[in-house]
Amino acid sequence: HVQLVESGGGLVQPGGSLRLSCAASGFTFTSYTMAWYRQAPGKEREFVASHTSFSGATRFADAVKGRFTISRDNAKKMVHLQMNSLKPEDTAVYYCNAYQTGERYWGQGTQVTVSS
């Protein structure tokens, strides 16, 4: 049974930081690229960041480059998203994602609200 469980969301002031975590189970974690997506109210879900397993390559959406970092712990089957210098436009539900060719899994999402 595949599970992706996000945590760490909440309310933060502009300029603040949050660290999201995703705990994975039920699949071979090291075979999957792990990623974060987000969906703001009234908008489509969009890519935020990804981290491959074997090469360790990371990729970021232009909107978060230089502010967000992604890391993964293969031993603990976890992936983290460190979000710094948060802006109101970062407000969204953030989803953990695991994918490889032909397979994709989603978490239930965690709300991040950036507001003063």
Image (cartoon, grey):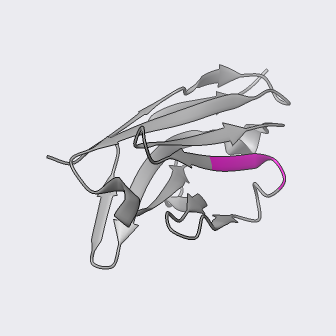
Q: Please tell me how many numbered marks the rendered image carries.
A: 0
Residue 88 is situated, as x and y percent measured from the top left of the image, at 75, 37
From what the image shows, is residue 48 above or below residue 85? below
**67 displayed left or right of 109:** right
Q: Quadrant of residue 98?
A: bottom left
- Furthest toward the left, the residue is 1
Using the image as rendered, state which of residue 26 and residue 92 is in the foreground.
Answer: 26
Q: Quadrant of residue 23?
A: top left
**105 displayed left or right of 98:** left
For image coordinates 78% across by 22% down, the residue present is: 13
Q: Quadrant of the C terminus?
A: top right
Span highlighted in magenta in the image: 66-70
For image coordinates 68% across by 29% down, the residue present is: 18
Residue 44 is situated, as x and y percent measured from the top left of the image, at 50, 61
For image coordinates 54% across by 50% down, the residue present is: 38
Residue 110 is situated, as x and y percent measured from the top left of the image, at 47, 34
- Furthest toward the bottom, the residue is 101
**11 displayed left or right of 45:** right
Residue 60 is situated, as x and y percent measured from the top left of the image, at 69, 63
Q: Is residue 42 visible?
A: no
Q: Is residue 111 visible?
A: yes
